[in-house]
Each structure stands twice: as C-alpha cells, then as structure tokens.
Amino acid sequence: MEKNLADVFTDVKKDVTTYLDLRLKLLKLETYEKTGKIAAVMSFVFVILFIVFFAVLFLFLGLGYHLGNLLDNQALGMTLIGSIYLLILIIAILFRKSFMSKIFSLFIAELTADDDGKEQA
C-alpha cells in the first residue's frame, strides 16, 4: 500500500509540475499576443498621426497663404495661422490630464479584455 501511495504522490507531483509548466507557457504566449497587438496598434496610430500631421500642415499653409492674399500681407496671414497653432497648443496643455486619463483607461481596458470582449477577473 505504501508503494501505491508513494506512486500516487509522485504522479500528482508530476501532474502539478506539468500543469504549472503549461500555465507558464500559456501566460508567455498571451503576453506575446498582447505585446504584438499593442505594437500593431501603436504602429498604425503612428502612421495615421504622421499622415494627419502633414495634411493639417499643408491645410494651414494654404490657409495662411490665402489669408495673406486677402490681407495683402503674407507675414500677417502666417502670423494668424501661427496664433491658431499656439491656441491649439494652449488648449491641449490645459486639458492634458483628462486626455491622458482617457487614453490610459482605453489602453488598460484593451490589455485586460479577452478576445471575446469580456473582462478578465
């Protein structure tokens, strides 16, 4: 009977070790998957921001030249556009905490969400 009990404990120990090893591998794979998703999203956002940056830049340059032609002073037109950029910068600085907290909340929600859209416990 003792040999059977020792065999049972050995088998249980082996099963628990195998289970823990598999759980660790699963955790690593899930981490790789989440990291890959984050890298893909960040790359996509970077490309979109890059395109938007140049689109806004050229739109404001065109608006600056247009205002310069209307006012018969190119420097004044560009100064007005620069002032708009400064106003946008001030607004962004004033609302940075609420903006950052929203982005952070979305980021954490994405990290903790299952593929089915349910939150993990």
Image (cartoon, rainbow, N blue to C red):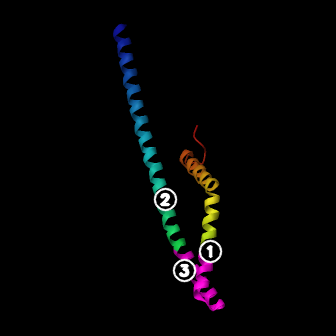
Q: Do the CB atoms of the residues marked 3 and 1 lie less than 8 Å apart?
A: no
Label 3: element kind: helix
Task: Say which quadrant the N terminus sits in.
Answer: top left
Asked which quadrant contains residue 12, the reply is top left
The amino acid type, in three-letter code, at marker 2 is: Met
Depth order, front residue of 117/111: 111
Tell me the chief SS of the magenta region: helix
Judge whether residue 71 is colored magenta.
yes
- The answer to which of marks 3 and 2 sits earlier in the sequence is 2
Going 41% across and 30% down the picture, which residue do you hit?
Answer: 20
- The answer to which of marks 3 and 1 sits earlier in the sequence is 3
Alpha-carbon span between mark 2 and mark 1: 30 Å
Residue 90: x and y in percent read 62, 64
Q: Is residue 43 left or right of residue 121?
A: left
Return the mark for residue 58: 3
Q: Nearer the viewer, mark 2 or mark 1?
A: 1
Judge whether residue 68 is colored magenta.
yes
Task: Say which quadrant the C terminus sits in.
Answer: top right
Going 60% across and 72% down the picture, which residue do you hit?
Answer: 85
Residue 72: x and y in percent read 63, 92
Q: Disc 2 designates what residue? A: 42
- The answer to whether 18 is drawn above or below residue 25 in the figure is above
Q: Do the CB atoms of the residues marked 3 and 2 lie less than 8 Å apart?
A: no
Q: Disc 1 designates what residue? A: 83
- The answer to which of marks 2 and 1 sits earlier in the sequence is 2
Label 1: element kind: helix
Q: Which residues are magenta?
A: 54-82
The amino acid type, in three-letter code, at marker 1 is: Ser
Depth order, front residue of 33/87: 87
Alpha-carbon span between mark 3 and mark 1: 16 Å
Q: Nearer the viewer, mark 3 or mark 2?
A: 3
